[in-house]
Amino acid sequence: MSTYSAFPAGVPVSERSLARAGFYYTGVNDKVKCFCCGLMLDNWKQGDNPIEKHKKLYPSCSFVQNLNSANISGATSQPTFPSSVTNSTHSLLPSLENSGYFSGSYSSFPSNLLNSGPNQDFAALRISPYRCAMNTEKARLLTFQMWPLTFLSPTDLAKAGFYYIGPGDRVACFACGGKLSNWEPKDDAVSEHLRHFPNCPFLGNQLQGTSRYTVSNLSMQTYAARFKTFCNWPSSVPVHPEQLASAGFYYMGHSDDVKCFCCDGGLRCWESGDDPWVEHAKWFPRCEYLIRIKGQEFISRVQASYPHLLEQLLSTSDNPEDENAESPIIHFGPGENHSEDAVMMNTPVVKAALEMGFSRRLVKQTVQSKILTTGENYKTVSDLVLDLLNAEDEIREEEKERATEEKESDDLSLIRKNRMALFQHLTCALPILDSLLTARVISEQERDVIKQKTQTSLQARELIDTILVKGNFAATIFKNSLQEIDPMLYQHLFVQQDIKYIPTENVSDLPMEEQLRRLQEERTCKVCMDKEVSIVFIPCGHLVVCKDCAPSLRKCPICRGTIKGTVRTFLS
């Protein structure tokens, strides 16, 4: 009865008789809805009997079947409603008369739409006129006029096959009849649909479309096949297998590495707050599976959040300043010189976190992640501080991991720091190659691959990158050989430490095709020195290894930055 507090006074049927018939008030005109079967009635007239009308229009309702008209007419007790129903005071479904679906004194003949929890008994579902009317995305979208949530868009729900039924945030699929509610900020409509109702024919039709285009891994085309690969997924990873499998990823079997079955894009180092669909759209926007399931609008929205991502990825690969920069911990985003960043970093909540002593860089990365995954900034200081503390814990764990690795010698650090300058100044690559071969640092095959380069600059590039991959001992051999062969360069590099890189042109100003050509210039894998390079590391952008060597690497062998993801390239 509490839902009838705003029920219109002039309606010729009493609130008590409506409540006894199982109806609660929706908040729209005189429209009421059955808590059990979902039948909605309005346009009440003098002499209408709610119980008889309920029985006539929807006789299969379990509540109305148990009613005894004679007993109810003298009863004084109120029917028991779920708390979510009795607390509802707003419209749970827009008027369908206005949408042109139905007219008269009823809005729909539902098909048991309000059963709580997932319902996978598809054979028992009745296909109602209303559900048939919901087979277009446009029609489903119209039902969300009174949708109460801001963090989950009606467009995404409608695209996933859902239409709004209420109360609260409850939706139903027009195809399988599955109902979902209690949505949370990190939920994805398609992923939840797949997780609860994997046999939905609508999703099946959507996914069957993958057979019409080329996929990288045919055995991983189905959600079930991908999900099975996560049986040994580390429990410490904050992203769930259901989300990853729904987004097209399958588990590679080590660490937290996953790959898309369609575009072959790889991602790793998953963090709290990461959304697989968002990361998929961020790094692999041309994936046909992604385009089919999420749509171009979603991809464009994600890409718009990172307008200079590709340019940064390409321009950082051969930028000496970026070689020594600390690799991103959370997300790889645009610089803070943009106006949207200024707005993002000047809210009272963000300012409070900065005043507490958190680094501006960490705060910015955490806020960017929040906005990208939920569409809004932090509303409370406590939520932001909690995520910042978690991020700091992750940084400490990464530092511990670094501490357990082989300590890099000063010589190797100098070579890495001055990599680009050595490309320009080193002219004696071949004698140093012989020294490395004599010391058994490299094989004859590795030496021959570098010797075959026709230009001295290319030999120098291959030599330096090989030393960086081989490690401390290789750096020592290089230092000793350089002292004998080129004392002047030795002095500038290891003694005075004033070797300079001379920029010949701004790489970022070059056309994208030229940047790609330069990235692809060195084709030999720096690890096996055999196969062609084909994997670009994210976010550093280095193209130095083949597809067989890449999975074993956690850090880029050139800059030692953490590898957050990989992009497969095909060289012509």
Image: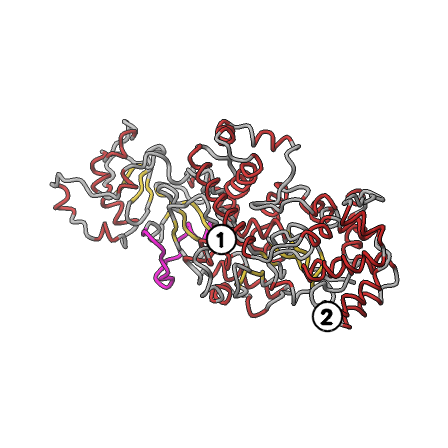
| Mark 1 nearby-residue class (10 Å; few <14, some 14–19, many ≥20) | many
Judge by depth and name the residue closer to the eye, 63 or 385.
385
Decide whether the magenta segment is chiefly helix, strand or loop: loop
| Mark 2 nearby-residue class (10 Å; few <14, some 14–19, many ≥20) | few
Q: Residue at x 81, y 70 (%)?
A: 448
Disc 2 designates what residue?
440
Horizontal placement of 396 versus 421: left or right?
A: left
| Segment colored magenta | 115-134
Q: Position of residue 274 (x, y in %)?
A: 52, 48
Q: Residue at x 32, y 47 (%)?
A: 38
Mark 2 or mark 1, which has the lower sequence index? 1
Horizontal placement of 541 versus 505: left or right?
A: left
Q: Nearer the viewer, mark 2 or mark 1?
A: 2
Q: Position of residue 485 (x, y in %)?
A: 85, 58
Judge by depth and name the residue closer to the eye, 405 or 28.
405
Query: Toward which corner of the image does residue 469 lie, by quadrant?
Result: bottom right
Judge by depth and name the residue closer to the eye, 175 or 160.
160
Three-letter amino acid code of the residue under disc 2:
Arg
SS category of the residue bearing label 1: helix
- Classify 302 as above or below 356: below
Horizontal placement of 57 versus 411: left or right?
A: left
Q: Position of residue 27 (x, y in %)?
A: 34, 34
Residue 201, disc: none
Distance from the alpha carbon under mark 2 to that under mark 1 = 54 Å
Position of the C terminus, as image quadrant, is bottom right
Disc 1 designates what residue?
190
Position of the N terminus, as image quadrant, is top left
Q: Position of residue 44 (x, y in %)?
A: 30, 36
Three-letter amino acid code of the residue under disc 1:
Val
Horizontal placement of 393 versus 449: left or right?
A: left
- Classify 168 as above or below 280: above
